[in-house]
Structures are given as C-alpha cells and as structure tokens.
Image (spheres, rainbow, N blue to C red):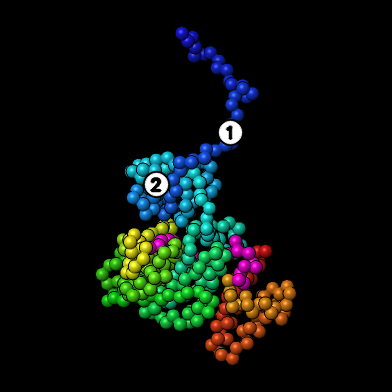
Amino acid sequence: MARARDEHERWARPSKRGSRPRTKQRPEHADALVGLVTGVDRGRYTLLLDEGGPHERDVLAMKARELTRTRVVVGDRVDVVGDTSGERDTLARIVRITERTSVLRRTADDTDPYERIVVANADQLVVVTALAQPEPRTGMIDRAVVAAYDAGMDVLLCLTKADLAAPDTLRELYEPLGVEVVVTRREGDGAGGDGSGGTPDDGAAAGSLALAPASVEDVRDRLRGRVSVLLGHSGVGKSTLVNALVPGASRATGHVNDVTGRGRHTSTSAVALRLPAGPGTGEGARTGYDGWVIDTPGIRSFGLAHVEVDNLLRAFEDLDAAAEECPRGCTHLADAPDCALDEWVEATDDAQARATRALRLASFRRLLASRTATV
C-alpha cells in the first residue's frame, strides 16, 4: 500500500545526472504522406493528397515545431502526418519539405537583404501586363524575366487588353529574346474601363467586358501540362484571366484608379488552381485537368537583391552576346569606357531596331545600377 504524502512534504527534484538526456534525434515519419500545398492562410496550409488518385482529398495542416523557421509556400511538396483524413475540424502536421525543383524569389527592393519566396516548383512564370489602363512597365517585365531565369524557369509574357492598344511594340522588344508572347483581348457590351474586365464584386457581371474565348484558349494552350505562376501589377486583368481559365475560381477583380493609374489589390494570397483540360486531347482530356495555375497577389515592386550581378546580363540574351566584345573588367554602366553595348546599339541602320536596342540597354543599365549600388 502506497504511503500517503502530506501536502506540505517536499518533493525531491530529480537529479540532472540521473535524468534521461534529451535526444536530438527526430522521428523518421516513415508513414508520412506527400501533399501539394495549394493555399496558405495565417499559419494554416491547404494540401492536396493522393493527387489524381481514388482517395484524392484536401487536408488542412500546420507546420511541425522543427519547421518553425522554414517557409512553406504554395507549390511545395511536403510530407505530412497526423490526421490526414481531410474531415472537418481535423488538422494534420507538415514534417518535411521535399526537394524543390525551382524557387521564384523576390525582395522588396534592390537594397533589401530579405528574400521572399513567391512560389516553389513552378515550371513557367507568366508575366501579365496590360497594354493600357494601366500603362505597361517594361522595367517590371525585365525584372520578372531576370528573376525567372535566375530560378531556372521559362517565361511567358501575357499582354492583356489588346482591345485598347496594339501589342506590336512589346512583341518586338521581347520576342527576339526568346520570350514567348501571348495576347488577350476583351469583348462585350459594357464600358470596360475598370482595368480588369469586371466589376469589383463579380467579374462576370452583366455589362462587364469578358475575355474573348479565342484569347483564353491561346493562353490555355501555353499552360497545358505545366505548373505556371501568374505575376503582375494590380489592375492588369490577371484575376480576370484566371477566372476565365478556371471557371469557378472566383478570384476577385477590381478597378484601376483614374488618378494614379494603378489597380486596387484584390487577391490577398497565392493559390494553386487546377487548369481544366478544355478542348483537345491527351492526358489532360482523360483526367479532366491539364496543369496548374498559381495566382499571386498584385505586386507594387519586384526587387532583385537576391540575384547575383553576373546573372543579370544573362537574362538579356541579346546584350549578353554583344558584351563578349567588351574589354576585360567592363562594368557595362553608362560611364564605362569602350563598352561594346553602346556600339551594339549603333550597329544597325534600321531606326526602329536601333530605338529598340537603346530601350533594352537602358533597362539593363537601370537594373545594373540599382544592384551594384548595394554591392
């Protein structure tokens, strides 16, 4: 019979020598399942398990303690344990992130040392740019192209609102670099000057300008079988495009400010959406979908502090080839003596080609100057 202890009796604290030391070994979690991160919301992660299988399901999860300082983003493939049934009010636990095939990063500006991971494991970056309302910004396009090439991703330039302006200038600027270009236009009976092709509350409301079906299919053809992340300023029609590609996505659309010419943020977090197969044949036609589309919030800036200076020139393929004639140690900046890039601009007799080359060189030098200021 155990002796009853008095409530005032002192309890002996276990000896440090005799207590079991804390182990640093973590469980292997050999029974973990693999899931795709399709959404992130305030520390909770939506995962897709058994993708394309008979037991496909969405599961809500949190990070294990050992991953507290590790960023989990949309597109990640993760190992998950715990309650993976996907039933309501259940919560699984992410214990590992599998090796990433690509990581798209950005910084707040060119002086910010903190890298922000946009998405992981994407094959293609789709830079969505309006031809008008708001006006296209080639500097933003150049930055996105540099970041994509640095991440080992392909680039697709999607020019929207071709019903308002011609795409010829931007085509001539980027197609020679191997950047594929696709153009969309709107059609409808409304005055679609809102910059998005829709109203703030319902992108498909009566009186709004819908995307021409042929335009949507042109884009879909270039996304088939791939994981594509859409990136662009607010108001360029990115969410409208996603809603057309993925019926039922219900991504909010908004107006462009008449004074500032900028769009209002509507998408607040990145989300991965299945791309319906649409017309055509192949694997996608059998499974009902053919690829993934990752929609991201509209951005104001795209810093490149994480990109090595030497890699900047490689993103400008035409300039990279011309720079081989530069003297050793050339900085390629505007004040660099005998820089072959200046000679390259003047080497053509075609006035239009010369103007295009000058724009390319000016864009590169702006990026280079902003980066070298921090090195």
| Cα–Cα gap, marks 1 and 2 | 29 Å
Could you say whether the residue bearing mark 1 is in a helix, strand or loop?
Answer: loop
The answer to the question of whether label 1 and label 2 lie on touching residues, with beta carbons closer than 8 A, is no
Write down the residue under mark 2. 60
Kindly identify the amino acid type of the residue bearing the numbered disc 1: Thr
What residue lies at 55% left-to-right and 63% top-to-bottom?
A: 151
Magenta stretch containing residue 100, yes or no?
no
- Going 64% across and 67% down the picture, which residue do you hit? 309
Q: Considering the image in quadrants, where does the C terminus appear?
A: bottom right
Q: Is residue 110 left or right of residue 46?
A: right
**Residue 33 % position (x, y):** 44, 45
Which span is picked out in magenta?
290-314
Q: How crowded is the residue under tag 1: few (<14 C-alpha within 10 Å), some, or many (20+)?
A: few
- The image shows residue 296 at horizontal and vertical percentages of 44, 61
Asked if residue 311 is among those painted magenta in the image, a careful observer would answer yes
Q: Which amino acid type is marked by label 2?
A: Leu
Mark sitting earlier along the chain (1/2):
1
